[in-house]
């Protein structure tokens, strides 16, 4: 069995009921804290236990089948690809001319970001901020319209 | 109208989209009856009264954002109608605003929609008339003056 990671989260397993095994008081205390939300580290803080102590107890509960680990998927941070910026710049050039790239860079400067640092989550904000720089309402609308389909891909 | 509202509802986090005239009468809606059928008219009337109070005091209202039932109730003012969007707290607001802009431009260009609006539109921009302000509305106006 691989060692217990302090970031791991556990919940009651059901393969072996706690009532059918002998548990010491500290093991019970740990078990009641493993609620499927708190990590092992958080439980150790609540119970004022050291890392070694809690890892030993969690390993025992795991081997007895009383608890199971909840697999957590960590969403990787996704950034907007260069293609997105190329397409945005092209759309903007058609509407307002060669100043397009300067406007995009100005907006990025205000957002305190470089082109390769804009997260997918921020795409809408970026496009809306760029469109706010277009004075002509019709062109502003055309820009938003053309960018909406690109945004929906992300 | 349904196909236009459907596009707005497609934005992640949107629960319901409602189009109402200035007397809070429903013209169209899409999505679940998330506000609650009975509450809707009352809430919308109250919001329109508040907005009208601002307008009477010389402010212009383009859109507003209210906290509502653990979510948000957004109001968008279009020339001849009122659009309310009930959504979750985590809605991507910029995405929603742009979608509404684009969709409503298309909708207000559609002859069928224009006909429907003209048939149901209430004379005058808003519920409030300077000569017919009730007690509740006076309170709103006083609050605005004090703020």
Image (tube, coloured by chain):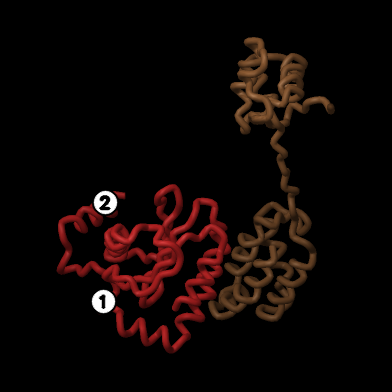
Chain colours: A brown, B red
In the image, farthest residue toward the top:
A24
Left or right of A114 on screen, residue B136: left
Position in image of residue B139 (x %, y %): 21, 53
Residue extending furthest bottom? B111
Chain containing mark 1: B
Q: In the shown orientation, is residue A42 left or right of residue A52?
A: left
> Is disc 1 surrounded by few (<14), some (14 to 19) or many (20+) residues within 10 Å?
few
Residue A60 is at least partly visible in this image: yes
Res. A12 image quadrant:
top right
| Secondary structure found at label 1 | loop
| Image coordinates for residue B4, horizontal then vertical, percent | 49, 76
Name the residue rendered at 50%, 79% in the picture.
Answer: B105
Q: Element under label 2?
A: helix
Marks 1 & 2, CB-CB < 8 Å contact? no
What residue is drawn where x is 51% and y is 81%? B106
Q: Position of residue B81 (x, y in %)?
A: 36, 74
Q: Residue A11: x percent and y percent?
A: 65, 30
Q: Is residue B138 left or right of residue B33?
A: left
Residue at 44%, 47% in the rendered image: B70
Q: Nearer the viewer, residue A125 or B109?
A: B109
- Residue B113 sits above or below residue A24 on the image: below
Which corner quadrant holds the N terminus of chain B? bottom left
Residue at 25% from the left image edge and 79% from the top image edge: B123
Question: Closest to the observer: A93 or A3?
Answer: A3
Numbered label attached to residue B124: 1
Q: Is residue B62 above or below residue A65?
A: below
Q: Nearer the viewer, mark 1 or mark 2?
A: 1
What label sits on residue B143 in the rendered view? Answer: 2
Q: Quadrant of residue A33?
A: top right
Nearer to us in this view, A19 or B15: A19
Above or below, B51 against B105 in this view is above
Q: Nearer the viewer, residue B145 or B33?
A: B33
């Amino acid at each position: 069995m691989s060692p217990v990671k302090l970031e791991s989260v556990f919940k009651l397993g059901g393969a072996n009921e706690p009532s059918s095994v002998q548990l010491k008081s500290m093991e019970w205390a740990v078990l009641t804290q493993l609620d499927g939300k708190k990590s092992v580290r958080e439980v150790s803080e609540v119970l004022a236990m050291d890392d070694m102590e809690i890892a030993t107890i969690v390993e025992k509960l795991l081997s007895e089948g009383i608890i199971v680990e909840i697999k957590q998927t960590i969403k990787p941070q996704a950034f907007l690809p260069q293609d997105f910026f190329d397409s945005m710049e092209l759309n903007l050039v058609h509407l307002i001319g060669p100043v397009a790239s300067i406007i995009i860079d100005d907006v990025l400067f205000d957002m305190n970001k470089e082109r390769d640092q804009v997260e997918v989550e921020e795409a809408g904000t970026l496009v809306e901020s760029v469109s706010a720089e277009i004075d002509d309402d019709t062109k502003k609308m055309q820009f938003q319209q053309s960018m909406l389909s690109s945004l929906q891909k992300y | 109208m349904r196909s236009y509202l459907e596009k707005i509802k497609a934005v992640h986090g949107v629960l319901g989209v409602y189009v109402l005239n200035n007397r809070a009468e429903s013209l169209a809606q899409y999505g679940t009856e998330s506000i609650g059928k009975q509450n809707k008219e009352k809430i919308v009337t109250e919001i329109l009264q508040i907005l009208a109070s601002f307008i009477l005091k010389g402010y212009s209202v383009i859109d507003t954002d209210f906290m509502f039932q653990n979510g948000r109730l957004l109001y968008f003012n279009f020339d001849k109608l009122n659009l309310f969007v009930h959504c979750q707290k985590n809605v991507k607001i910029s995405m929603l605003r742009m979608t509404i802009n684009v969709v409503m431009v298309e909708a207000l260009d559609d002859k069928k929609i224009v006909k429907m609006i003209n048939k149901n539109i209430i004379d005058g921009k808003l519920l409030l008339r300077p000569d017919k302000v009730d007690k509740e509305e006076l309170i709103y106006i006083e609050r605005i003056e004090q703020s």
